[in-house]
Image: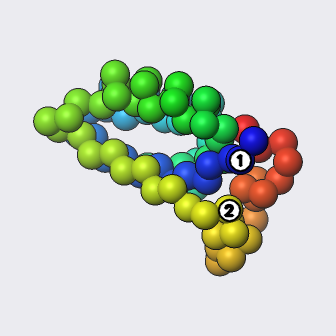
Amino acid sequence: MKELYLVIAYDTPSDSRRAKLVRLLKGFGERRQYSVFEARLTREQWAHLKGRLEALVDKKEDILAVYFLPPEAVGRTWRVGHEGLKRLEDPDFV
């Protein structure tokens, strides 16, 4: 099964929703910056996450963007700093 590679970014004025988004996204991906996550998901996992995001995000106040990347983009990603983070291509990720 082909996996999806995602970058998820969000912004919300609500501390409560922000905390819920962080908890939810930590269950599906790796936090890269304060409001940015990367994930490698199956289509079924994405469908589940998408439904939960749609239920959580306030469409009038929040912004959430999901960027779908081609698999080869992961290997071409350039990073500097915080070497302790898991690499997206590591097999135990999500």
Residue at the limit of the structure toward the left, as seen here = 60
Residue at (69% x, 47% y) in the render: 3
Q: Which mark is residue 30?
A: none
Tag count: 2
Residue that badge 2 annotates:
71
Using the rendered view, name the quadrant where residue 88 is placed: bottom right
Residue at (61% x, 31% y) in the render: 45
Local packing at callout 2 (Cα closer than 10 Å; few below 14, some 14-19, many 20+) is some
Q: Is residue 56 above or below residue 10?
A: above
**Residue 57 image position (x, y, % from top left):** 30, 31
The Cα–Cα distance between marks 2 and 1, rounded to whole angstroms, is 9 Å
Residue that badge 1 annotates:
2
Residue at (34% x, 28% y) in the render: 54
**Residue 8 image position (x, y, % from top left):** 47, 49
**Three-letter residue code for mark 1:** Lys
- Tag 2 secondary structure: helix
**Three-letter residue code for mark 2:** Pro
